[in-house]
Image (cartoon, helix red, strand yellow):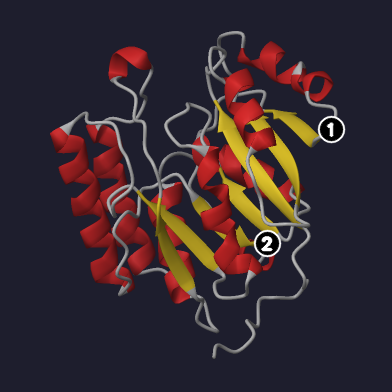
Amino acid sequence: MQTKSPYAVNQPVTKVSIVIPVYNEEKTIHHLVRLVAEARLPDGIRREIICVNDCSSDGTGAKLDELPALFPQVEMRIEHHPVNRGKGAALRTGFKTATGDIVLVQDADLEYDPADYMKLVSPIVDDRADVVYGSRFIGEPHRVLYYWHTVGNKVLTTFSNIFTNLNLTDMEVCYKVFRKSVLDRMELKCDRFGFEPEVTAKIAKMRPRLRIFEVGVAYYGRSYEEGKKITWKDGIKAILTIVRFAFTK
């Protein structure tokens, strides 16, 4: 039987904050937020949705401002960056304003399915975990797309595992879920896609040691023609970020 987590400062869990960094997603954001608002959560758990517009150059900002009226039944907060700063910076803005006991990261591009929320948050609600990672590589449905992207993700995950001594299968996955008390102890710095290796390195170093779970999630990836943004250059930056945070306190 597992002992109670030292990070479980607000038991029982009553609210999940879902933080959505958004950049140029005017075509998907309303549908995505509808899925988030309707996704099943454990009994008794409320949700708040925090959308952070990272200075989109299309009509995303206006679409976001319509959301509170469209979903009056959901606690909703909309933040706007005056300049484009990147996914990591948008997440920091969302984390700072989150009021839930649990914080869940959700991308705005419909590649990930909010129907997976139950399995993502349950290990924390049941006090079996402090951090939960999704994984696109352990058996759930996924769209068949780019072979070299899969290879790149697995190489980055292996490289990260070497330095963190974790046995993750998908370090770069969007779906990461944290106790708010864990995030409050971190000073995150990366502004762009370096958030993934940075936060992984920092949870691996945190003491007392965190209980980290990984669960399979569905993945409906987009092609570049459909708006996918990450490129091989971000992979190179991820390698440099892994090394950077492996040797910093």
Position of residue 128 in the picture relative to residue 14 (left or right): left
In x, y percent, where is residue 132? 49, 62
Q: Residue furthest top?
A: 59
**Nearest the camera: 83 or 197?**
197
Q: Is residue 190 above or below residue 231?
A: below
Compared to 53, does 178 lie above or below? below
Q: Mark 1 points at which residue?
A: 73
Few, some or many residues within 10 Å of mark 2 (<14, 14–19, 20+): many
Instruction: Identify the residue at image location x=67%, y=49%.
Output: 95
Return the residue at label 2.
Answer: 180
Please tell me how many numbered marks the rendered image carries: 2
Label 2 near label 1: C-beta < 8 Å? Answer: no
Q: Distance between the residues labelled 1 and 2?
A: 23 Å
Badge 2 marks a residue whose secondary structure is helix
Picture coordinates of residue 49, whole percent (x, y): 71, 38
Residue at disc 1, secondary structure:
loop
Is residue 214 among what the camera can see?
A: yes
Counting from the top left corner in percent of width and height, residue 116 is at 51, 46
Query: Which quadrant of the structure image shows residue 37?
Result: top right
Pick the quarter of the image with the N terminus: bottom right
Q: Where, by quadrant of the figure, is residue 39 drawn?
A: top right
In the rendering, at what x and y percent does residue 119 appear?
Answer: 52, 56
User: Would you say 53 lies left or right of 9 here?
Assistant: left
The residue type indicated by label 2 comes to: Lys
Q: Residue at x 29, y 21 (%)?
A: 223
Residue 13 relative to residue 55: left or right:
right
